[in-house]
């Protein structure tokens, strides 16, 4: 993995997986998946991160890194 960045201004988590140029993107719910020309996943954007992580009881899920 190359970089992980949280943008507080737009409440989005950006996960950069490679340095390939982005050719196109697909929206999948609250995520935008960016792909290279040869269909490799380059960048994942998780929009509205606070809402994405919230549980039904209003608490937040814990992020677990492996």
Image (spheres, rainbow, N blue to C red):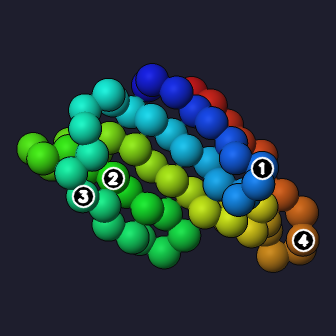
The numbered disc on residue 58 is: 4
What crowding class fits label 2: few (fewer than 14 Cα within 10 Å), some (14-19), or many (20 or more)? Answer: many
The numbered disc on residue 24 is: 3
Sequence-wise first label, 3 or 2: 3
The image quadrant of residue 24 is bottom left
| View extreme (left): residue | 38
| View extreme (right): residue | 58
Separation (CA) of disc 3 from disc 1? 25 Å
- The picture places residue 11, in percent across and down from the top left corner, at 73, 57
Sequence-wise first label, 1 or 2: 1
**SS at mark 2?**
strand
What crowding class fits label 3: few (fewer than 14 Cα within 10 Å), some (14-19), or many (20 or more)? Answer: few
Left or right: 20 as drawn, with respect to 4? left
Residue found 89% across the figure and 63% down from its top: 59
Separation (CA) of disc 3 from disc 4? 34 Å
The numbered disc on residue 34 is: 2
Q: How many marks?
A: 4
């Amino acid at each position: 993995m190359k970089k992980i960045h949280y943008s507080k201004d737009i409440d989005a988590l950006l996960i950069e997986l490679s340095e390939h140029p982005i050719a196109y993107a697909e929206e999948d719910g609250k995520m935008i998946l960016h792909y290279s020309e040869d269909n490799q996943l380059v960048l994942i954007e998780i929009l509205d991160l606070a809402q994405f992580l919230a549980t039904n009881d209003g608490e937040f899920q814990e992020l677990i890194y492996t």
